[in-house]
Image (cartoon, rainbow, N blue to C red):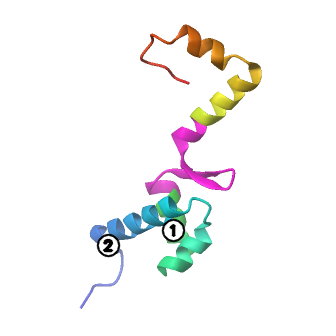
Amino acid sequence: MEASGRPSSSRMDINTARVVEIIQRDRRLTVREIASELGLSYGNVQCIVTDELRYSKVCARWIPRNSGMQASRRKKFLKMGILPYMRQNNSTDRHEDF
């Protein structure tokens, strides 16, 4: 018989892997749709997506949080016309932030 209370970490790892698989298949799904597909609660899926995987929604797609910041910086610099200039001057620099 399984004890009640907090689930084992291996069970949580399985759920996390299932969530990752679903998000990779279709990044436009909502937390509610993922929860419905997996039979998990909305809160559990929200926790997995935002806390464990550190994803956030940007333009209706799930992306890792750091990528969103980099993409928004790129977009900002492209609008300002700076990014092509920075890439040209930093072509030999291996630590490009943009």
The amino acid beneath tag 1 is: Val
For the magenta stretch, what is the residue range?
A: 50-69
Instruction: Specify whether residue 62 is painted magenta.
Output: yes
Q: Position of residue 13 (x, y in %)?
A: 33, 65
Compare residues 71 and 4 and report the one nearer the observer: 71
The amino acid beneath tag 2 is: Arg
Residue 7 found in image quarter: bottom left
- Give the quadrant of the C terminus: top right
Compare residues 49 and 97 and report the one nearer the observer: 97
Q: Position of residue 48 (x, y in %)?
A: 47, 62
Q: Residue at x 48, y 66 (%)?
A: 22
Instruction: Specify whether residue 73 is painted magenta.
Output: no
Q: Residue at x 54, y 70 (%)?
A: 43
Q: Residue at x 52, y 56 (%)?
A: 50
Q: Which residue is mark 1?
A: 45
Vertically, is 97 above or below 42? Answer: above
Residue 76 horizontal side relative to residue 96, left or right:
right
Instruction: Assign a secondary structure to mark 2.
Output: helix
- Give the quadrant of the N terminus: bottom left
| Residue 40 appears in view | no
Vertically, is 75 above or below 48? Answer: above
Residue 92: mark: none
| Residue 71 appears in view | yes
Q: Which residue is mark 2?
A: 11
Alpha carbon distance from label 2 to label 1: 13 Å
Residue 53 found in image quarter: bottom left
Vertically, is 17 above or below 95? Answer: below
Counting residues from the start of the chain, the first of labels 2 and 1 encountered is 2
Q: Position of residue 49 (x, y in %)?
A: 50, 59
